[in-house]
Amino acid sequence: MNGRSGLFKFVIFVLLLVIVVTQVLSIIQSRRLYQRLDRVFEKLSSGQIGRRITTGRAVTDKADDLPMPEFSGDEGDWLVWCLRAEPRTLNMISVDSDAYTNYVVVGSIFERLLEYDYDEAVMKPWLAKSYEISDDGLEMVVKLRDDIHFSDGVPITADDVIFTFETTMNPMVDASDIRGFYKNFKQVNKIDERTIKFVFDEMYWKTFEVVGLFEVFPKHIYGFEDAAEFNTRRSNPVGSGPYVFEKWDVGQQIVLKRNENYWGHKPRLKKIVYRIIINDLAALQSLRAKEIDHLIPTPEQFYEFQNDELFQKDFYCLKYWVPGVPFYFIGWNQNTPFFKDKLVRLAMTHMIDRQRIVELLLRGNAEVVSGPFYLYGRQSNPEIEPWPYDLEKAKELLTAAGWVDSDADGIRDKNGVTFSFKFSYSTGSTFYEQLAKLLKDEAAKIGVEILADPYEWSIFVERMNDKKFEAAVMGFGGTIESDPYQTFHSSQIQDRGNNFVSFSNPQADELIDKARRTMDKDERYALYHKIHAFLHEEQPYTFLFTRPAFRFIDRRFQNMNVHKLGLYEFEWYVPRDKQRYH
């Protein structure tokens, strides 16, 4: 009896276990079904399924040789950036594109043939599968990957690459500052649907990078008959990257959402929001109120919070040097009666106490520089010392240039022109406002009058491009190695080129051209040292300072790594229990 009872209990236990397991499997299967349905509804709402049907592109598993890593961590949440100015355009092939344009679209919406590896700082294939350079360096054949496509599902082909190049080189397209990089390009030929041959007139040491860092535009989206149509396209960017454009609320924010049809491994964050906050204090307040996640602080803000333990419980407080950090400068418009004489430009440099600016306004978080090259790179000439602060020398130089106070009113003059000029800068920056006041006081000591001339960023940039200014302060960032051709060669003065101070010197042109053709690194660095020394004497800019990158970032983000080339936000994620946005 006990034996039968035990057997009966065992059978009942097994039946109950089967029922429980069946229920669990049913729940799991239901969850998977709902997850699949969620993905289907998400794709339906974004139009992706319709696009795949019309393009005939089948859904396939990811290839094993994708150039990006397969990102780890929980999916979800948004990254809310603070932009300190609103981009003038989201079109990269435009003279109006700027650093803020880059922040929003490069790498996220538009992708390139090659990309820099953030740890090794070398270029590797991205949209390209492979490349081959001829022995004489005058031809480069690029083979595209087979699995790449734009966000609407249309495959990327050689036609898109050639369209992008021809658009850039079209003289009616307002992109003169970009065309200078392609000066040595002879032609770009289509070999087949996936193969492009670039042919060059002459050697240029930066050619490999110029071909590689080539944002590919979809011809079927951007094709035009009238260049004016292309020039006015400033919004709604379409590319092949891991994010797609959602909206631009002018004056407020730009929103990107994850490209669920992305050809590569998708990042974990579902949205990137670029919140536009121009005022320094307002930006910091928004960070502390958890309204934004990512802020590039002013040096003064970084100094204030870099040792604040309470602040650092909530935010990463990062400071790091990378190639391409900007150098800041005052550009002297040489089309004005004041600054066409290099003696006057040199006097202006002696008037400025740059070390005091670094210590007082930047709280020591910067280094005074004497030229346009990365301070810790091989292009920079280590033997050049910045000109010293010397008001007596400034006065001497101005007098030698013929600027004297002929009517005893306290301001120098020459040929009936009073030495009173406007100092232009972008609004919203406490530093620029303080700098303007400091320079005004220093200028008065040598008989020169400076008038503050602030503008909202988009207007400021427009005036720089059109050369409608007298003196202006701003910063330029670069790549691992930079080419001064864009900013100091006389050919870049016209057609809204980047030589906006109109610096024209045959000797400088000759040195810059020779350096572009020099492939041997040691010989090229020697030439750049000469260019550095020449610009130091000519002072088309007063080179002020460079500084490391500063970042305040909400600590809920994980996988936060500072690579050799800086931060790579696509690898970040937020643990599910810390996610803020849904």
Image (cartoon, rainbow, N blue to C red):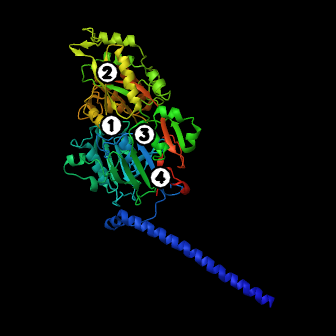
Between marks 3 and 2, how big is the CA–CA gap? 28 Å
Residue on which disc 4 sits: 68
Between marks 4 and 1, how big is the CA–CA gap? 35 Å
In x, y percent, where is residue 87? Answer: 33, 42
Residue furthest toward the left?
226
**Is residue 133 at least partly visible in the picture?**
no
In x, y percent, where is residue 515? Answer: 36, 30
Image quadrant where one finds the N terminus: bottom right
In x, y percent, where is residue 12? Answer: 69, 84
x 55%, y 73%: residue? 27
- 233 and 200: which is toward the camera: 233
| Secondary structure under the numbered disc 1 in the rendered image | helix
Residue on which disc 3 sits: 282
- 280 and 83: which is toward the camera: 280
Three-letter residue code for mark 1: Trp
x 33%, y 53%: residue? 238
Three-letter residue code for mark 2: Ile
Evaluate if marks 3 and 4 touch, with contact meaning CB atoms under 8 Å apart. Answer: no
Between marks 3 and 4, how big is the CA–CA gap? 36 Å
- Label for residue 457? 1
| Secondary structure under the numbered disc 4 in the rendered image | loop
Foreground disc of the pair 3, 2: 3
Q: Mark 2 Cα within 10 Å, few/some/many (few <14, many 20+)?
A: some
Between marks 1 and 2, how big is the CA–CA gap? 20 Å
**Dot 1 or dot 2, earlier in sequence:** 2
Quarter residue 296 falls in: top left
Residue on which disc 2 sits: 450
